[in-house]
Image (cartoon, helix red, strand yellow):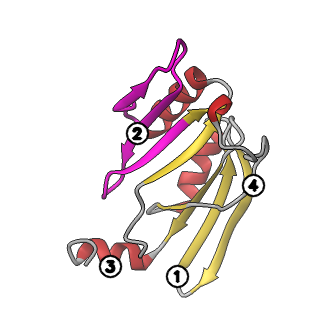
Amino acid sequence: MLRGLTTITFFADDLTAAKDWYTELLGIPPYFERPVAVPTAYLEFRIGDYQHELGILDRRYAPHGAGDGPGGAVVYWHVDDVQAALDRLLALGAKEHESVTHRGAGFVTASVVDPFGNILGLMYNQHYLDVLGAGGAR
């Protein structure tokens, strides 16, 4: 039934600031922007080994019940060095949500709250590397 990650959507009150912050973090501009009106209502980055989509939606268009503060599921992105990734995010103005945590069996996690109130998870995950090394999902 669930076949793979397609898009993760974060919310921001200031899409221009979110665009600038994530462009700096990721080192690429968004590949897609949807203006419903001026200013932009939605933008999207394709990132990582599988070109997963990270969308940022103007909070005015968030689904009913979406909170204003950090909450909900934490989506973890594989990184090769959790501490280095955490340090970079903190230097860019994110706030620590969960410090580096060794979970056993080689799994390491941490998370931050971005300047727009979204939780961004970091994980070193050997399974991710094994799937990538085998040529991707089967």
From what the image shows, is residue 105 above or below residue 5? below
Please report the bounds of the magenta region as a residue range: 27-56
- The residue beneath circle 3 is 130
Residue 93 in the image: state x and y as whole percent: 67, 35
Residue 40 in the image: state x and y as whole percent: 51, 20
CA gap, disc 4 to disc 3?
Answer: 30 Å
Where disc 4 sits, the SS reads loop
Which one is closest to the eye, mark 2 or mark 1? Answer: 2
- The residue beneath circle 1 is 106
Determine the residue located farthest toward the top in the rendered image: 38
Which one is closest to the eye, mark 3 or mark 2? Answer: 2
Which disc is residue 71 wearing?
4
| Amino acid type of the residue tagged 3 in the rendering | Asp
Of residue 18 and residue 98, the one placed in the foreground of this image is 18
| Amino acid type of the residue tagged 4 in the rendering | Gly
Identity of the residue drawn at 46% across and 20% down: 35
| Amino acid type of the residue tagged 2 in the rendering | Phe
Residue 56 in the image: state x and y as whole percent: 54, 37
Of residue 121 and residue 79, the one placed in the foreground of this image is 121
CA gap, disc 2 to disc 4?
Answer: 22 Å
**Image quadrant of residue 33?**
top left
CA gap, disc 1 to disc 3?
Answer: 13 Å
- The residue beneath circle 2 is 45
Identity of the residue drawn at 39% across and 67% down: 4
Which one is closest to the eye, mark 1 or mark 3? Answer: 3
